[in-house]
Image (cartoon, rainbow, N blue to C red):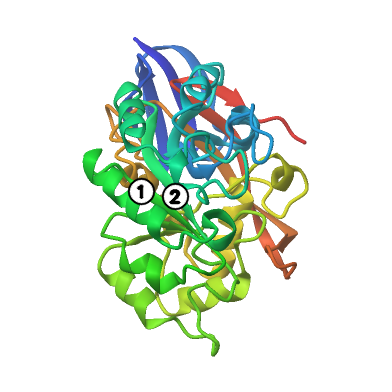
C-alpha cells in the first residue's frame, strides 16, 4: 500500500499526472493511479512538478546582516529545498546545520570561505580569516549539508584584495573534490573579466543579469566577448535576483542573444522578501518568463538544473526513486506589477500561484495571504 497518492494533477504541458509516494520516495508516476493508499490529496488540476529548489538564499536566522527563516522562504512559498549561499563560514556553519533541522523545508548550504560568513559586508577583505585546513575539516564533517562553497568577489567584499580570495576559493575547491563553487559578482575592482578568467566549467556565477557597470553588458549594451567565451566553456550563470542584482533590460538583452541562465534563484532574505523587490521564488520565475524564457525552461531552472549543478541526485525530477519533494502550482490570469532591482516596472498578465509544497511525502498547503 502506498503512503500517499496525489490525484488529478497536470504536467507543465497539460497532460494528466498522478504521483504515488511510499517511504518518502516517489513510487509511481502515471496518468492515473488505482493502487490503494493510506491518504489522498486532490491537486484539483494544479500543475505538479518536482519540488522547487531555490539555489541562492540567506536563511541562517542568527545572523544580523542577511538572514531569514527557512520555512518563510521555503514551504510557505512552494519551495521544497533552499540552498543558503554563504551566510555562514566554518566557525558557525555547524550551528546553522543544527538549527536547520527544525525546518520543514529541506535546507542545504554553501559554506563561505571566510570563517564566520557574512557577519560584515567585507568578509573577504581580511585574508587571515580564510583558513583552508579548517574549511576542509568542516566540509568533511558535514558532507550532507555543505553542498558547495561561496565566494563574494566584488569591491565592497574583497576590499583591496582583488581576485586573491577567488584564487584561494579555487584552491580549496580542488582539494575538496571539486565541490561546486558559486561566485558573487558586483562592483569593480576586480573587473568581471578578471573573475571569469579564473572560472571553469561547472563554476556558478550569480547575479548574472545585474545592471551594474561591471556586469555582462558593455557601454553600448552588448554582451561582452569574454562573457560569451565563459558561457561557451561551461561556466554556469544564475539569476540571484537580490535587492541590487537584477535588471529587466540586461536580462532581456541576454535572452535575445541566447545567453540563458541555467538557474533561477532569489538571493532572498527577510528585508527583500518583506519589502521587495524579490518577495519569493514564484515572483522571480514570473520575471524570467517576462524576459522571454519559456515555461518548461523556467521550471527546469528551479528543479532539474539546480539539482544537477549541486549534485543533488535524489532531487529535481519526477521520477520513481527520487525524493518525494513536489510543488503544486497554477498559472492564473491576472495583472501584476513586477519591479526589478533598479526600480523599473513592468506589468504581466499571468501569475504563478503555488498551491502546496510536498517535502518527503508530507503535504504543506499554502495559505492565502
Q: Are marks 2 and 1 in contact (CB under 8 Å)?
A: yes
Residue 34 vs residue 312, the one in the foreground: 312
Labelled disc at residue 324: none
CA gap between label 2 and label 1 equals 8 Å
Q: Do we see residue 50 in this rendering? A: no
Look at 62% across and 69% down and name the residue there. Answer: 247
**Extreme residue toward the front, this view:** 128
- Looking at the image, is mark 2 or mark 1 earlier in the sequence? 2
Q: Which residue is mark 2?
A: 151
Nearer to us of marks 2 and 1 is 2
Residue 241 percent across, percent down from the top left:
58, 56
- Judged left or right of residue 200, residue 297 is right
SS at mark 1?
A: strand
The part of the image, by quadrant, that contains residue 90 is top left
> Mark 1 = which residue?
181
Q: Percent x, y for residue 326?
A: 46, 33
In which quadrant of the rendered image does the C terminus lie?
top right
Across and down, in percent, residue 125 comes to 52, 51
86 or 328: nearer the viewer: 86
Q: Residues within 10 Å of mark 1 (few under 14, many from 20)?
A: many
Which residue is at a point 44% across and 42% down the rendered structure image?
128
156 or 53, nearer to the observer: 156
* Residue sitting at x 33%, y 47%: 309
Q: How would you rate the neighbour count of disc 2 (Cα within 10 Å): few for under 14, some for 14-19, many for 20 or more?
A: many
Q: Compared to 164, does 252 lie above or below? A: below
Residue 42 shows up from this direction: yes
Amino acid at each position: 500500500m502506498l503512503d500517499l497518492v496525489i490525484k488529478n494533477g497536470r504536467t507543465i504541458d497539460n497532460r494528466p499526472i498522478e504521483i504515488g509516494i511510499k517511504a518518502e520516495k516517489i513510487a509511481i508516476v502515471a496518468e492515473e493511479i488505482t493502487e490503494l493508499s493510506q491518504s489522498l490529496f486532490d491537486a484539483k488540476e494544479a500543475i505538479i512538478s518536482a519540488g522547487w529548489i531555490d539555489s541562492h538564499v540567506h536563511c541562517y536566522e542568527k545572523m544580523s546582516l542577511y538572514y531569514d527563516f527557512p520555512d518563510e522562504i521555503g514551504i510557505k512559498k512552494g519551495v521544497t529545498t533552499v540552498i543558503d549561499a554563504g551566510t555562514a563560514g566554518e566557525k558557525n556553519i555547524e550551528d546553522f546545520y543544527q538549527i536547520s533541522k527544525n525546518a520543514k523545508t529541506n535546507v542545504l548550504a554553501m559554506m563561505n570561505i571566510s570563517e564566520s560568513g557574512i557577519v560584515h559586508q567585507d568578509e573577504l577583505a581580511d585574508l587571515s580569516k580564510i583558513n583552508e585546513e579548517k574549511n576542509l575539516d568542516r566540509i568533511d564533517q558535514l558532507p550532507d549539508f555543505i553542498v558547495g562553497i561561496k565566494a563574494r568577489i566584488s569591491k565592497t567584499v574583497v576590499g583591496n584584495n582583488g581576485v586573491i580570495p577567488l584564487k584561494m576559493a579555487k584552491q580549496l575547491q580542488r582539494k575538496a573534490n571539486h565541490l561546486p563553487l558559486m561566485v558573487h559578482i558586483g562592483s569593480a575592482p576586480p573587473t568581471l573579466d578578471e573573475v571569469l578568467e579564473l572560472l571553469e566549467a561547472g563554476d556558478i556565477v550569480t547575479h548574472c543579469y545585474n545592471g551594474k557597470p561591471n556586469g555582462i553588458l558593455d557601454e553600448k549594451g552588448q554582451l561582452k566577448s569574454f562573457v560569451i567565451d565563459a558561457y561557451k566553456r561551461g561556466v554556469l550563470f544564475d539569476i540571484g535576483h537580490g535587492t541590487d542584482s537584477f535588471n529587466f533590460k540586461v536580462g532581456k538583452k541576454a535572452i535575445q542573444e541566447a545567453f540563458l541562465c541555467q538557474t533561477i534563484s532569489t538571493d532572498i532574505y527577510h528585508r527583500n522578501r518583506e519589502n521587495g523587490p524579490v518577495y519569493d521564488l514564484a515572483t522571480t520565475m514570473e520575471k524570467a518568463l517576462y524576459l522571454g524564457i519559456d515555461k518548461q525552461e523556467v521550471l527546469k531552472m528551479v528543479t532539474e538544473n539546480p539539482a544537477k549543478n549541486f549534485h543533488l541526485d535524489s532531487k529535481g525530477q519526477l521520477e520513481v526513486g527520487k525524493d518525494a519533494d513536489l510543488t503544486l502550482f497554477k498559472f492564473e490570469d491576472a495583472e501584476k506589477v513586477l519591479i526589478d532591482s533598479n526600480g523599473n516596472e513592468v506589468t504581466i498578465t499571468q501569475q504563478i500561484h503555488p498551491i502546496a509544497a510536498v517535502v518527503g511525502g508530507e503535504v504543506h498547503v499554502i495559505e492565502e495571504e
